[in-house]
Image (cartoon, rainbow, N blue to C red):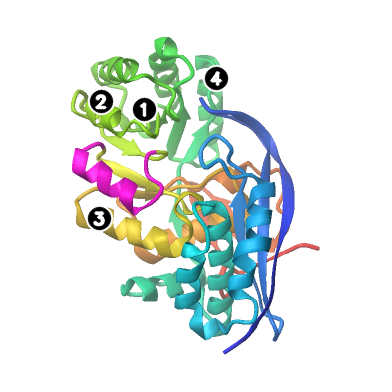
Amino acid sequence: MARIRAVWGRALSVPLHTPFVTALRRTSTIDTLVVTVLTVEGIMGLGEAPQVWAVTGDSVASAAACVEQVLAPVLVGADTDDWPDLAAHLVGACARNFGAKAAVETALLDVVAHLAGMPLAHLLADLADVPRPVQGPGGGFEVATDVTISAGSPDALGAAAAARVAEGFTRLKLKVGTDAATDVARVRAVREVVGGGVGIRLDANQGWSREDAVTVIRALSGADLGVEVVEQPVAGGDVEGLAWVRSRVDLPILADETVFGMSDLDRVLRLGAADAVNVKLAKCGGPVAGLRLLARAAEAGLGTMVGSMMESHVGVAAAASLVAAVGTSVVSDLDAAWWAAQSPYAGGPAYGPGVIRLGPGAGLGMSLVP
């Protein structure tokens, strides 16, 4: 048992080693709010609310205001043994603000896992009522991930893909959707460079119209370029359009920006709009909601993966812990922290060939450098 003493946020801007470019935006930094939950006994937990104007509408400033004015008062003075009730109260404390809620809930769970002397993945497995994942020989967990190839010219994508494969990544997520007329050429350029043994998936980030999506996806199928899945081909709010596209193409369709919470997922299922869903903590409000979305999707026969926004090591470690706890049917998208030129944390996840490695420590196993 521990009593929560304080909750606060710290704004960070972490430079990227390479610009990150999609159909929605271009950025050279990770701009994020790192939330700390501190107990009277001195135990600290971390969570993260990334700034994602184009997807969630959340900013560092809005997340900070939400944490300070609405969410922190839910926790301060409370007992960590009551964490399930506290997590439920965070959900109902305000509308939306999913990034802020995810950050505070993650930090709370990080504290709870620390107090129990277990990694966050074990706490989440217990919550999901599944066997705890087995740690590797050195402790910790390895979770497979793809790596993103930013939008650009066919030559630029081919060069970036070759570099990532040389570094040991075996699945590439190509950012398309900036120009439907040349997107097939982009995919072809990458396939010619990397050969047939590397997985390729596409993310249009809502960049195509319904008609362009069908045209491009059919062309990709006809060209036999070995595309595994196409993520969010049309606008996130156009669920009927997503279903319209899916009914007219052969490649699997993955819903991302279309699904924030359970009502969104139920609508996708009702309309038959996707073959799989990408669950992100900053979209759904935290690990507890993430577990429920993954379970609901799996029960309905939908493929599952866990993704990351452009966020730092805290948010990615929480997402990877979720995958380690319950698994997904599709290799997840957890490369966001790989883009960071340096880490502002002591400890935390590291990247290996095609994987993200979680350390053996309790909770998230990391702390924010002063």
Side (left or right) of 296 relative to 261? left
| 3 vs 2, front mark | 2
First reached walking from the N terminus: tag 3 or tag 4? 4
Viewer-side residue, 55 vs 321: 55
| 4 vs 2, front mark | 2
Residue 272 is inside the magenta segment? yes
Where residue 235 appears, as percent x and y from the top left, is 40, 29
* Residue drawn where x is 44% and y is 34% of the image: 173
Tell me the element at label 2.
Answer: helix
**On residue 152, which mark appears?**
4
Side (left or right) of 317 relative to 244? right
Q: Is residue 186 above or below residue 201?
A: above
Question: Can residue 54 be seen?
Answer: yes
Neighbor class of circle 4 (other Cα within 10 Å; few <14, some 14-19, many 20+) is: many
Number of numbered callouts drawn? 4
Q: CA distance from mark 4 to mark 1?
A: 17 Å
Residues tagged 3 and 2 counted as in contact (Cβ below 8 A) = no
Residues tagged 3 and 4 counted as in contact (Cβ below 8 A) = no
Rendered-image quadrant of the C terminus: bottom right
Residues tagged 1 and 3 counted as in contact (Cβ below 8 A) = no
Residue range in magenta is: 258-273
**On residue 298, which mark appears?**
3
Viewer-side residue, 279 vs 97: 97
Where residue 248 appears, as percent x and y from the top left, is 19, 23
Tell me the residue that label 1 is attached to: 233
Tell me the residue that label 2 is attached to: 245
| 3 vs 4, front mark | 3
* Residue drawn where x is 30% and y is 51% of the image: 329
